[in-house]
Amino acid sequence: MTTAAKPNLDHPVFAVLKQAMPGKTFRATEFRGCSTLIVEPADLHGVLAFLRDDPRCAFNFLSDVVGIDYLGYPTKQIGRFAVVYVLRSFGRDDLFFVKTYLDPSLPTDGIAEDPALYLDSATDLWPGAEWMEREVFDMFGIRFRNHPDLRRILTWESYPAHPLRKDYPLRGRGERELYKIVDRTSS
């Protein structure tokens, strides 16, 4: 028998953060028993450091970093792009999400470096964030300040766009047509 997850907006981490950082603006959501803290982009690194270092939180493992493009989403969001950090506390067997929103200041149909799509890297907190942040950069064009090796990880260095942006054409921009077909006899 399964029971429905009850709302967890009273997650103890929310109260700890509110008490420790009274001047910061936070939002909290809960969906299917998973708690998400929504922070301002400028506050993200400080909040992540606090969640890792404070013994009341002790989120000692960064499980994932994901990007989301909300272009065309049916409900209004705070920004077009979101970056979500998935944290785990092994001591409490607790999963916690930290999300921040970014809104582009330039058209997103190309490769232009947008100053509004920057976040501070979490690689100094969790070295394992390096590859995850590189993937978010490669697929969405969100750049991470102080990242030790921010370069593409899934596409080649001169790739003309960021393919998981929703304004990227479904059939691509001719990338496949540029390469010679290699078959068994020519390899």
Image (cartoon, helix red, strand yellow):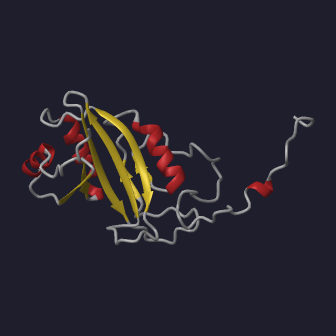
Q: Is residue 151 left or right of residue 52?
A: right
Indicate the position of residue 50 as horizontal and vertical percent values. Answer: 19, 41
Indicate the position of residue 98 as horizontal and vertical percent values. Answer: 28, 49
Q: Based on the displayed image, in which of its 4 quarters is residue 115 positioned?
A: bottom left
Residue farthest left in this picture? 19
Residue nearer the viewer, 172 or 2: 2
Q: Quadrant of the N terminus?
A: top left
Q: Is residue 182 left or right of residue 115?
A: right
Q: Based on the displayed image, in which of its 4 quarters is residue 128 positioned?
A: top left
Q: Based on the displayed image, in which of its 4 quarters is residue 146 positioned?
A: top left
Name the residue: 25% across, 28% down.
90
Q: Is residue 174 left or right of residue 58?
A: right
Residue 9 vertical position relative to residue 91 in the rendered view, above or below: below
Name the residue: 56% across, 46% down.
152
Total numbered labels? 0
Indicate the position of residue 138 as horizontal and vertical percent values. Answer: 54, 50
Name the residue: 14% across, 49% down.
14
Residue farthest front in this picture? 1
Residue farthest right in this picture? 185
Residue nearer the viewer, 73 or 154: 73
Name the residue: 52% across, 61% down.
165
Q: Quadrant of the C terminus?
A: top right
Indicate the position of residue 85 as horizontal and vertical percent values. Answer: 34, 46
